Image (tube, grey):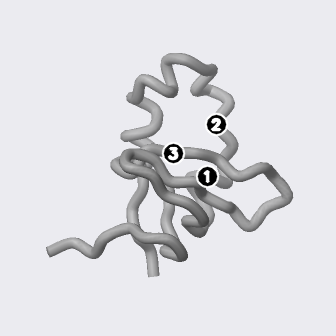
Amino acid sequence: MPAKIKKGSLVRTVREKLENSLEAQASDSRHFPPYIFESKGEIIELNDEYALVKFYTPTPNIWLRLDQLELVD
């Protein structure tokens, strides 16, 4: 059984799921910053479908769908 994403979990964004999403169609997907795919982020808030992710870069936090995230060690 896969581990469940919860507050405080370290995650990485799954490029294929974000680039092919409705959210990507609503914005310019060519400009997704590389750090969201290449670095770890921490879940700081959750709701039913989305997680607020804090990346350890001097940038704002970002809401991503839970299915667009994967747990990392």
- Lower sequence index among marks 3 and 2: 2
Give the side of residue 29 with respect to residue 49, left or right. Answer: right
The residue at the point 79 percent across, 61 percent down is 57
The residue at the point 64 percent across, 36 percent down is 32
Between 52 and 1, which is closer to the camera in this rendering?
52
Give the side of residue 69 with respect to residue 32, left or right. Answer: left
Q: Position of residue 67 (x, y in %)?
A: 34, 48
- The residue labelled by disc 3 is 64
Amino acid type at circle 2 is: Phe
> Which residue is farthest right?
58
Amino acid type at circle 1 is: Ile
- The residue labelled by disc 2 is 32
> Is label 3 in a helix, a strand or a loop?
strand
The image quadrant where one finds the N terminus is bottom left
| For residue 2, above or below residue 30 | below
Q: Quadrant of residue 39?
A: bottom right
Picture disc at residue 36: 1
| For residue 17, above or below residue 25 | below
> Which residue is farthest front?
47
> Is label 2 in a helix, a strand or a loop?
loop
> Which residue is farthest left?
1
